[in-house]
Image (cartoon, grey):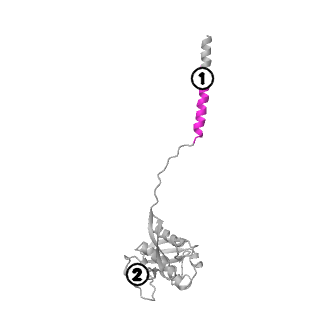
Amino acid sequence: MGQRLLLIAFLLVLGVLGGLLARRYLVKTSDQPAPTIARPVRPTVMREVLLYFITADGHRLEAENRQVEDCPNDEECLLAILQSLVEGPNGERVPVLPARTRIRSVKIEDDLVAVDFSRDFIAAHPGGSHAELLTVYAVVDTLAVNFPYVRQVRFLVEGKAVDTIKGHVDLRAPVIADFRYVRSDSRLPELPDELFNVPSGETQRGR
């Protein structure tokens, strides 16, 4: 009889100890963070583009190679290219767009691209006939050289058509790409000849 009671007491103590150990284990494991599952990282795909900036002497446009992140459609790529123009050149070249300029939107209409700039495109521009000319053709030629089907650009500011930047280059109609203002060693040989053969003194315009 006494041995049976001792056995029962031993089993009870063993059960209590087992329960305490099990509880401590469960509490400890519940405090541990769930294991994270590593997701595969997709490598960033870059595309090389050409940007036109003003030469150090301020006379012409000169090409600069730049890497931009690849994009799912042409409008987003054009937007990224224009934003790179806003960021400015490397080295001694001169910016073509005011640093505060924002690109509000880009829309493609066949061979025409409508670019909507923020008001700083005009407000922060230094002005002057030659500076305006190089700004306009830096934008148009940069888009055309990277997307050859783009032949003309419509300039908008805050969603509205504008006459000029500061009174010199006519922006009332779309501006057609014209590479006469680009240094000859910055031109690409596959560009159509007609882009370099505009009669002197004339500015090409869209119809």
- Residue 72 visible here: no
> Number of numbered discs present?
2
Q: Is residue 150 left or right of residue 171?
A: left
x, y (%) of residue 1?
61, 10
Measured in 3D between alpha carbons, the distance from the residue under mark 1 to the one under mark 2, in whole angstroms, is 94 Å
Q: Amino acid at mark 2?
A: Leu
Q: Nearer the viewer, residue 194 or 104?
A: 194
Q: Residue at x 43, y 88 (%)?
A: 200
Residue pointed to by mark 2: 195
Q: In the image, which disc is placed on residue 73?
A: none
User: Residue 192 sits in which quadrant?
Assistant: bottom left
**What secondary structure is marked by label 2?**
helix
Q: Nearer the viewer, residue 72 or 37?
A: 37
Mark 2 residue crowding within 10 angstroms, few (<14) / some (14–19) / many (20+): some
Q: Amino acid at mark 1?
A: Leu
x, y (%) of residue 26?
58, 34
Residue pointed to by mark 1: 14
**What secondary structure is marked by label 1?**
helix
Name, please, the residue furthest toward the top: 1
Q: Is most of the magenta stretch helix, strand or loop?
A: helix
- In the rendered view, tell whether residue 198 sits above or below residue 36: below
Task: Tell me which segment is drawn in magenta.
Answer: 11-32
Nearer the N terminus, badge 1 or badge 2? 1
Q: Is residue 131 magenta?
A: no
Q: Residue at x 46, y 60 (%)?
A: 44
Quadrant (top left/top right/bottom left/bottom right) for the C terminus = bottom left
Q: Residue at x 59, y 24 (%)?
A: 15
